[in-house]
Amino acid sequence: MRISNWIHSLKTGLFLAFRGIRRGNKTIQILTVSMLLLVFLNLVLPRALLRGLINTVNGKLVTLMTSNVTIAPPKSQAVFADVDTIEAAARATDGVDSVTAQQKIAVQISADGNSTTYGTQVVEPAEYTQVFEIQKYMKQGSFLAADDQNKIVLGVQVAGDNNANLDFYATSLRTVQVGDKVTVSFNNGKAAEFTVKGIFDSDFSQGDTRSFISREDYARINPTAAAQTSIINVKLKKGYSEDQVMASFNSLNLGVVVDKWQNQAGVLRSVTKTFDVVIILLQLIALIVGSITIYIVTFVDLNNKRKQIGIQRAIGISSATLVVNYVIRGIVYAVIGNLFGLVAYLFVLVPWERLHPFKFPFGIVFLEVNGSYLVQVFGVLFTIAVISSAIPTWRAIKIKILDAIWGN
Amino acid sequence: MIEVKNLSRIYNLGKIKVNALRGINLVIRDKTVTSIMGKSGSGKSTLLRQLGLLDYPTSGEILIDGKPVQKLDDAKRGRFRLSLLGYVFQEYALLTELTAEENVYLPGMMLGKNGADFRERAGELLEVVGLGDRKTHLPRELSGGEQQRVAIARALINQPKYIFADEPTANLDTLSSRTVMETLVRLNRELGVTVLFVSHDPDDKQYATEHVFLKDGEVTNAYL
């Protein structure tokens, strides 16, 4: 076919498509666009929710438990030989925002006949609150300050907080409130009375089983052990990746074990990995359902237009024109449906969910807004629309003209 | 001129073979109005569809202006129909999403004629068939007779040499039938278009200058 013929075919196809869209059955058009809108949302929503859940879990993990990067002593040692040097080196590394050293010690906390053995974290309060955001989750009271003496901060799962609905209430202190006294028994045989300064609730059961005392207090009870540090947590500046900072730090060859938060996630890592698999499965199913739905709708619509296609062929309209005609219709419906889906998602669902967020055991979950994924969905549905329009049109074109016209 | 040589069309309906056309020989001269008449099932519409390149014969030859066309592929047949033939169906085969004027000028677009020209011509043709004031109406807003006249105007848009009309008045009332047939005859006289029409109504014979009678797929009489 000559190029000029292709141009005439294209022009005629566009003419037929836009006339068809303008004058076509409005109910069918609205249903088609609505269906495409739902397919779009079906592809976007479950992923956005699960990704939001993963983001919440990961965010809490980093800001409450692991920090971005952890530095541990060499495997042959339980504690750092010279923690100050390592901390200083970490602080000097490009991309590092703040650093804190801590150690977890085995203790028993008792109050009113109840006791817990979750252990406690020995921290430098000022440094700790730079790296972590525990202070944002205080349910009662406040976090430790540098000049506190014999003060302890408890996670809600440790304190119990008179809330029998807590996940670990049975193994908690059950009724402890801010201002109450608790007895902390250390592994050197000493015990001391601490006043509960604050109770935090991060909606993150795993993190809320922790408690905190200051290094200064611990030094009074166990001066030798207080100087020991088993882990250094590093918070990164925005725009820096864990791998980037780890590579810089490792180049110093300090003989320590540097790891990123992902490897510290423990059971949560497998949970998020499972979520990732679930997301892929849901997307796959949504994509298949979406493709079949679009195909069926287009196929039924084109089947109803078989006579019209037959007439067009009988008067000399070329196959290319017919394909252009129906593919353009498919594309227009897909673009409109996707745009409505996008608008509904970005300007209705997401803002609404921001006002009424979903509450999960891990905390509040916001729908993820991922521009590149939205563009991908747009592209995929666009392609499906083209294929779903082209195949039935091509099949309709292959039918004998008279059969198409007489509906045989 | 159209020459038909030993044309046969056999339909295979399962194990049954139906000989719709049996060795038809025919010559249609230019600028004539030819009626193809016969009872229902005589093969007249089948013959017209072969000549209109809407179907493939089982055997035989069709020469249009000396060119054998029976073996052309679909794409070439489409171009041939577009430029040389106009076809009017028994049913009002208009595109429902286009106005009367758009239905008429659509085949013109395929030939890439100048937009303004073919719109103007479509308007003129609608005037010729008496529908100058119905240009912007959709098919559902037109009567059966009006739709058939739009179909005739459409068949003329590319200034074809031949118009084939397959029982164009079958679904029309008497007045509309007369208007449609008179329109075809007038087009023949004024534009020199060769018209072939199929009819089972003996009254339509009056509109033709040549006559072909079919019975059981064979030509029984021809007054050419």
Image: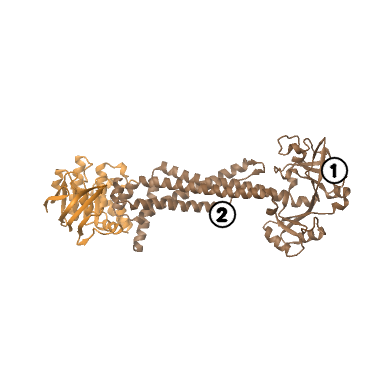
Chain colours: A brown, B orange
In this view of the protein, which residue sits in the foreground, A100 or A71?
A: A71
Judge depth for marks 1 and 2 and give the one in front: 1
Q: CA distance from mark 1 to mark 2?
A: 53 Å
How busy is the neighbourhood of tag 2: few (under 14 within 10 Å), some, or many (20 plus)?
Answer: few
Mark 1 is on which residue type? Ser
* Residue occupying image coordinates x 68% and y 56%: A238
* SS at circle 2: helix
**Sequence order check: which comes first, mark 1 or mark 2?**
1
Visible residue check, residue A19: yes
Determine the image quadrant of residue A257.
bottom right
Q: Image check: A182 left or right of A95?
A: right
Instruction: Tell which residue pokes out farthest to the front in this image.
Output: B15
* SS at circle 1: strand
Residue denoted by label 1: A185
Quadrant containing the N terminus of chain B in the rendered view: bottom left
In this view of the protein, which residue sits in the foreground, A179 or A362?
A: A362
* Residue occupying image coordinates x 36% and y 44%: A304
Give the image location of residue A277, x and y in percent. 58, 49
How busy is the neighbourhood of tag 1: few (under 14 within 10 Å), some, or many (20 plus)?
Answer: some
Chain letter of disc 1?
Answer: A
Give the image location of residue A212, x and y in percent. 79, 46
Q: Image check: A6 left or right of A62?
A: left
Give the image location of residue A142, x and y in percent. 78, 43
Does A77 sit above or below residue B182?
below
Residue denoted by label 2: A372
Chain letter of disc 2?
Answer: A
Visible residue check, residue B104: no
Whether discs 1 and 2 lie on one chain: the answer is yes
Give the image location of residue B207, x and y in percent. 15, 48
